[in-house]
Amino acid sequence: MKKRFFVRLICFFLALLAVPAGYFAAVQSLPAMFQGSLMGSVYVKQQLVQNTPGKRVLVVGGSSVPYSIQCEQVAEEAGMPCIAMGATAYLGLEYYLALIDGELHPGDIVVLAPEFAMLQNAVSYSTTWMAVENSPSLLAALPVSYWPGMVSSYYTYSRQKLDLLRQKGAPAATPQEQYAAFGFGPWGDIVTERESMLESGYDKNNILTLDDSSLSDEVVKAVRRFAKQAQKAGATVVLTWAPFDELAYTGAAQQLEEFQTQLESRTGLPYIGRLADCMLPAELFYDSNNHLTTEGAALRTWMLLDDLAESGILP
């Protein structure tokens, strides 16, 4: 009697799982709909990391990375390719680290330049679904810690995908064509010429205040795990800053100095440059408090190169 009951119970739960499993399979069989956005660039950048031999400079962060680093300039000065591994901060720093963790080469220089939201671990799992979409390699790279959030956010993402499919139909362009159309260059940076579009000089909806929640334990643990793996692979890992509009910061310079000390001590990584330097003039920002104009990107690139040289990482 008991055996029959448990068999029926198991069959009941399997039947319950069949419905979401069937829904997932049906949605995943449809064309990817977000490959023409910043999120869609992640697949192409993963391919860049996987298919670029030898030692590289890998700059890792959110959308500020492609908008603030000119990869060809870094490559020319460093004597090695530079890849801008950033799309949006809402994928979380841990996911970007997972994407490159198994792809590191001896001599690689990994520059972690996370935006403040990434240090707070402000992950949007529905946005992460937009990035991974139908790609088995991007799905496989997801950290285990992401899966509860990915499961709970799948319905939200799937409805957005289905709505786009009904409105626009399947995209005709390949991921690479969409990637280029968005303004990305061959090494993952935004190469489109751009000038400031911010009427007030900054985005008033993104004001920065540093407090005890500005650096999460999850981010610290992920960075420390990654640094150990990178050391085994023969790669060098350093921390640096992502640019931020000085008009949108409410604190004092001393808080930035204290936060930089906290970053170094908790992650165990060297910090190149000064965190206070991240506060750049408003006229250098394009369309957000993190995205630089072409002029701003040129300045930030030279600052990064100077910091790498001063630290002895580059000759």
Image: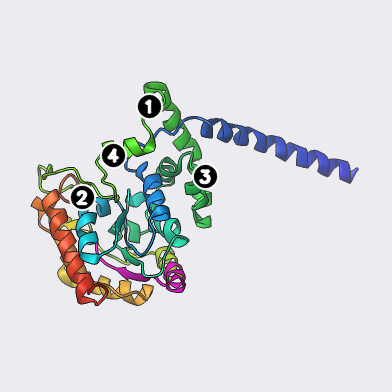
User: Do tag 4 and tag 2 residues touch (Cβ < 8 Å)?
Assistant: no
User: Do tag 3 and tag 4 residues touch (Cβ < 8 Å)?
Assistant: no
From mark 1 to mark 2, how far is it between C-alphas?
Answer: 29 Å
- For label 1, the residue is 172
- For label 3, the residue is 136
- For label 2, the residue is 291
From mark 3 to mark 2, how far is it between C-alphas?
Answer: 30 Å
Q: Residue furthest right?
A: 1
Residue at x 23% of width, y 47% of height: 190
Check the picture and name the quadrant holding the N terminus: top right
From mark 3 to mark 1, how far is it between C-alphas?
Answer: 21 Å
**Region of the chain picked out in magenta, as a range:** 226-242
Residue 113 higher or lower than 11, as above or below: below
Check the picture and name the quadrant holding the C terminus: bottom left
* Residue type at tag 3: Pro
Looking at the image, is mark 3 or mark 1 earlier in the sequence?
3
From mark 3 to mark 4, how far is it between C-alphas?
Answer: 22 Å
- For label 4, the residue is 180
Left or right relative to 310: residue 261: right
From mark 4 to mark 2, how far is it between C-alphas?
Answer: 18 Å
Q: Nearer the viewer, mark 3 or mark 4?
A: 4
Left or right relative to 135: residue 5: right
Q: Position of residue 236 (x, y in %)?
A: 35, 71
Classify mark 1: residues with Cα within 10 Å, few (<14), some (14-19) or many (20+): few
